[in-house]
Amino acid sequence: MEGDLKEEPKEERSFLPPALQGLYNGVRDGIKRSTIRIKEWYEGIFAGNDLLYMLTYMASISTAKISRDEIFKRTGKKEEFISSKYIDTIRKLVQEWHYDYSAACNAVADKVKDNRTTDMLDRMGNAIKSGEPDEEFLMGELKTTQTITKNRYEMDLETLRKANDAFTALLISASVVSIIVLLSVAIYGSSEVGKMLYLSAFVVGITSAFSIFLLFSASPKEFKTHPLPNRSKEQKMIDYWQRICIPLAIILPLLIVIFVSSSEAFPFFKEALAFISFGIILLPLGLIGRRDDKNIDKRDLEYPGFIKGLGSIMSASGMTIQNAMEKVDRETLPSLRGMINTLQKRLKTGLNPDICWNRFVGESGSNLIYKFTGIFTDSIKLGGEAEHVGNLASSSSLESVLLRMKRDVESSQFTTLVLPLHVSMLAILLCVSQVLVIFSNLLGGMMANFGAAEGALSDIPGIGSLGFGMFTGVSTGHMHSYVLIITIIITIASIVACKIVKGGGYYSYFYYGSIFSILSGVILISVPFLIGLILNVAQFQIPVGTVPTNIPGGGF
């Protein structure tokens, strides 16, 4: 019958020859595998700290006295927790493959790469096997995880402090190497000047990349902003204006480099103008992002008190969330006051509570509020003890806030050090390069006027032995490109390093990028001009035919 006929799947048509098609399929599969591995690596480095959120959720919903199956089912569906996929895998092994929970926990633990998650799953399997009640185990495991997370975070901060020192030492070393290479090229000269300079720039780039990798490896891994489409007011502004500012920040500097010309007094004028224009365009985005970062810090600091007070009011009076929110003291919550008032109005109008809370979370912009608000509302909805749930969410969130405050202290000290270091290193590099260029041009002109460079100078007692001809081999074009490349490398390294140490949202790149780009541009303009004024080449020029060769005693 026609209705019984099943349409066979159509084969994907290919317009490539068999050999090229095989190559295309291999490249495509390789990209897919690489993407999966990068995603697993990225999730793995954040899984340890994210474990605290998941255990807080499991402990909170366990106060509702629900079954173990329900705990694993609901936790496995919470995609905002990185480790929830392991809980979902355990649930599937139990329900679909008829494992017992203890064996399933141990089986999944063997496949997990994060050590803290592996240890937690092993302890969970042992507790289930020994018959320990779920709520009792989860409460104890949450306290254990809080202690481990705090100790690990403080160890990471101590490692980060040492990595900060290593970064500054490597940055200084890279700048010193650049200066030594410049002097070596000027003194000894070589037919391979370009290769020497570019090889040195490559070494400086590798050194900077290695120092950034050290910082990333040592820094605590955490998210500060949530991934929801509904965001805070500042984040919405950044999302809108970055579509205009980022292309403009790329196109305008390129146009400046192409159409603007430099002068002898300002040899890096067009490059400096490109740096400054790039920084000025990104500066508004950086300032908005900085304001949002500070607002998130204030909201996160007030949130533990808000959620704990709300749970206590609900437990003491037996009120619903909507009614209990009227009793919350808003005077102690200045940063959350407006958001709480808006949330209460929306709940009073009869809107879906889930939608109201999602808007509250989205407008906060905070990942911490995003994680713990869902923990609180889900637990209350299931019938959990309001005061107990509020205390659990408050203690875990407060621990995260206090640890982040310690990191902010380290990041502020690091930024305070990197800013003057960045300025001084670039200024010294440009100072040395400009002095070499000025002396090279001066001595080259003198030798051209005399007609026989070394011979003419050697007739002057006391001058020929000084070896002034060594500066005449400096290639100003290669030196100009070399200084510019080193400036770009050091600027990028400073931007990325400050972002890694500080943490926060991606818009921190805008903030630090604007600051360091403007500083680099100002240095590129000011330092060569000031060196030219100080040396004042005109004072050193010697007219042709007035060289004194018969001064008694030699010398000038």
Image (cartoon, helix red, strand yellow):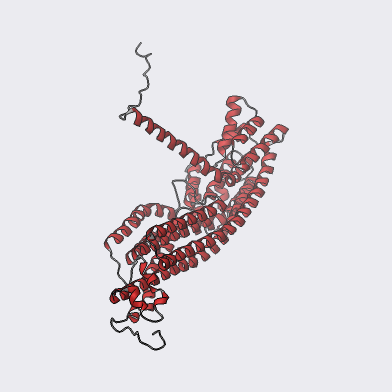
Total count of labels:
0
326 or 448, nearer to the observer:
448
Q: Residue at x 59, y 27 (%)?
A: 95
Position above or below: 501 against 519:
above
**Quadrant assignment for the N terminus:** top left
Residue 460: quadrant of the picture: bottom left
Coordinates of residue 328 in the picture (x, y in percent): 58, 54
For residue 136, what is the image quadrant? Answer: top right
Q: Position of residue 85 (x, y in %)?
A: 55, 36
Tell me residue 395's x, y (percent): 63, 51
Q: Vertical placement of 415 versus 366: above or below?
A: below
Q: Give the image location of residue 165, x and y in percent.
A: 57, 61
Residue 20 showing in the rendered view:
yes
- Front-lying residue, 24 or 301: 24
Left or right, 456 with reference to 415: left
Q: Nearer the viewer, residue 505 or 156?
A: 156
| Residue 331 seen | no
Nearest to the observer: residue 182 or residue 72 = 182
Q: Quadrant of the C terminus?
A: bottom left
